[in-house]
Image (spheres, grey):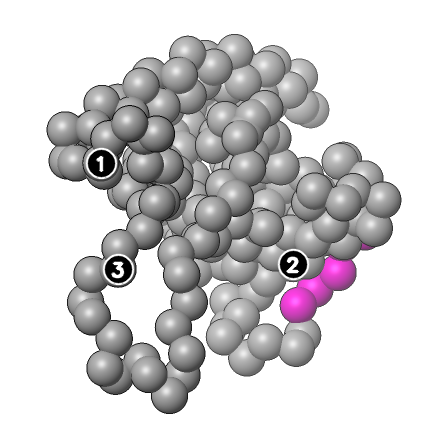
Amino acid sequence: MTLRKLVMGLFLIPVTTLATALPALAEDKAAAAPAVQITDTVLAPFADHYEMRVEKSADVVWQHLKKLYVDGERMRQQGFIVSSVVDDPTAWLGAVRGVREDNTSRPKVTIMVSGIDDEARLLTLMIVLENPVPAYVIHQVRPDGAHASIYQTIIQTRWPVKKPSNGELTPDYIREKMQADVAFHNQEVVEIMQREKAVIEALD
């Protein structure tokens, strides 16, 4: 599963699970730990984005996105039991948690709102999955005439790159791997977003 399918399939998101975290440091040795860890896997910065025109007014698209992600409707569509997060004081703009006990690979998903602007139709989210780091997602809707809009989504996270069996984790190697991953993800973006476009344009 790609990163976008991970995030957008939950929320529009196949992605290879981000399965490897960096080595944890013992609390009593944290201050003396070296700044750079020698490891077989690193987490490299990753960003993805897509923009499309939708034959629906900006207000209709905006309300649809809030229902999907702020209210948790996307997770309900995927069989999660959704509830509001009330046990985390950092969820100051609201958050929803989806639990699906029959899914051993992804039993829990939390979507935390980090920013919401009704005037700018701008929604920013932190999505916590089973991965080493959360994904940060931005959705924005802009009017494009009275009956159409531009829908843009941006995803940013860090992506694991494993050390090659016969080499080292050099900047050139990581660059080559990340460029290949980005290209692979982008191949599937159009298909995913076009499906979402059809759903939006069928709204009343």
Residue 83 included in the magenta stretch of the image: yes
Q: Is residue 72 visible?
A: yes
Which one is nearer the viewer's eye here, 36 or 203?
Answer: 36
Q: Position of residue 168 (x, y in %)?
A: 22, 36
88 versus 105 height, above or below: below
- Span shown in magenta: 81-85
Quadrant where the image shows the N terminus: top right
Residue visible at 52% across and 49% down in the picture: 131
Q: Is residue 117 left or right of residue 57?
A: left
- Mark with earlier residue (1, 3): 3
**Amino acid type for the residue under numbered disc 3:** Gln
For disc 2, the marked residue is 96
Q: Position of residue 11 (x, y in %)?
A: 59, 36
Residue visible at 41% across and 12% down in the picture: 187
**Amino acid type for the residue under numbered disc 2:** Val
- Mark with earlier residue (2, 3): 3
Residue visible at 64% across and 20% down in the picture: 199
Which one is nearer the viewer's eye here, 50 or 149?
Answer: 50
* Callout 3: SS: loop
Q: Is residue 8 visible?
A: no
* Callout 2: SS: strand
Residue 168: which numbered mark, if any? 1
Q: Are marks 1 and 2 in contact (CB under 8 Å)?
A: no
The residue furthest right is 102
Residue 179 included in the magenta stretch of the image: no
Residue count near mark 2 (Cα–Cα under 10 Å), binned few <14, some 14–19, many ≥20: many
Question: Is label 2 or label 3 in front?
Answer: 3
For disc 3, the marked residue is 37
**Amino acid type for the residue under numbered disc 1:** Glu
- Mark with earlier residue (1, 2): 2
